[in-house]
Amino acid sequence: MKNITPASRRTFIKGSVAAVGGVVASPWLHPRARAVGANSDIRIGVVGVGSNVKIGGKGKQDIRKFRKYPGVRIVALCDPDRRILDAQAAECRRLNEPVETYSDVRKLLTGKNVDAIIVTTPNHWHALVTIWACQAGKHVYVQKPASHNIFEGRKMVDAARKYNRIVQCTNNSRSATGFREALAFVKKGNLGKMLCVYGINYKPRASIGKAGGPQPISKSIDYDLWSGPAPKAPLMRKHLHYDWHWDWRYGNGDLGNMGIHFMDGCRMAVGADKLPKHVMSIGGRFGYEDDGQTPNTQVIYLDYQPVPVIFEVRGLPKSRTVPAGAWGKNMDAFRGVRTGVVVVCEGGHLSGNKIFDKAGKLVRQFAPTTPEVGANFLQAVRSGKASDLVADIEEGHTSAALVHLGNISHRLGKTAGDGEINERIAGRKELSESYDRFKAHLDANGVDLKTAAATLGPMLTVDPKTERFVGDFSDKANKLVTREYRKPFIVPDKV
């Protein structure tokens, strides 16, 4: 908005909050954001405190992390669950951190006492909070995955650029692990030609149970605010918090929960700044019947050139028959890796920050030189340069989009027998080998694919420039690039 007076500006902000979501496309005004200098305290608000009073979650973890940095003050907390919010506020005050508390993030963002926010909400809120914060002149540190869908991620990038805000998205592959340094060694040709890049997320998840009908919502929770952009639907799972990860309306499955860390590393390995031309998924939810919707066992094929990315998700125990001490010999450990990135080359392979020769012997290990992502975010806020970020929002968006591509193929898929799947993937050696590991994992857990068929997703064609699908199945696939938003929590086309 142009030529607006201070008085009218205050009236506008007051009205937008009082309406509790009257105008959402652009309810904030950016120009009067406080400049953060090298010697200024950075005042942080945390949006999404956690999922449990005692354990907390990412919000509580980030509070503990950021309060340790010099020149940082936690000044505001926001969560629609008043019980969790009040417990964390009491903890902050016990540590002599006076904080303001909010149930509605829109009210937090109108305040002048916050320079930056940490977003640790469920995935379906990431984009809208980030966009609103940029419009309000706040910098943003948003937890993985950047977005709930592809459209949202691009709008987050647009908002960061338009309002010149520092927006960092956390993915472990870009933190201080030594992975970047080991990858640089490989890219110099020290292991010969790169053959394939694998993302590995072998992390057992227990069943979330079967609710058997709508569940009561705790009186401490403002369920309208919790639902936000998603439908305000009856709670059809036993636990509102955390188990939203396995519900498509709010989460993105384990591919978007833990897997995104390594999906990001896979993209770093192939050096891609855009989406691949094709994507395909094989997967399913096996081993139990519960209220979860997302697959717990999955293989995603991303057709990057000159080498593909193959991502493997395992959500069941490593085996019902193999002793715990034999994990490394079980098919559920790929080259000894349970979670991480494996880059296979002619002369050996990379795993994390380690380099191995063709015989599997460790030949070199790299120490990190990359700054820790939290400290790096604060550095960029002080410098005002997005180029200082090790994990800029555009990187977060592109990697999260790979998660969404794989899940879209799965959601459009149909159950198929082993023969049909083998026929569809014939000629793709690495994908066939991953599918064999997929089957071995299920067999070790007593899952018979003859009675519990896998879902075979279509091989979808992607236009990397538009970040949309083309060709066969594109009409249905493009509907999942975005979602139906619930008023007034609408992610705008123009930020």
Image: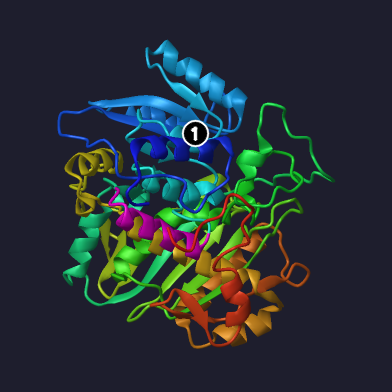
Coordinates of residue 321 in the picture (x, y in percent): 64, 53
The answer to whether residue 371 is left or right of residue 455 is left
Magenta-drawn stretch, dominant element (helix, strand or loop)? helix
- Helix, strand or loop status at disc 1: helix
Q: Nearer the viewer, residue 367 or 491?
A: 491
Residue range highlighted in magenta = 149-165
The picture quadrant where one finds residue 221 is top right
Q: Residue at x 46, y 36 (%)?
A: 11
Residue 262 in the image: above or below residue 415: above
* Residue 239 drawn at (x, y percent): 70, 38
- Residue 158 is inside the magenta segment: yes
Report the label total.
Answer: 1
Answer with the quarter of the image where residue 425 lies: bottom right
Q: Nearer the viewer, residue 309 or 153?
A: 153
* Residue 150 at x, y percent in the picture: 49, 65
Q: Amino acid at mark 1?
A: Lys
- Lateral position of residue 288 relative to residue 98, left or right: right
Q: Which residue is mark 1?
A: 107
Q: Looking at the image, which is closer to me, 113 or 417?
A: 113
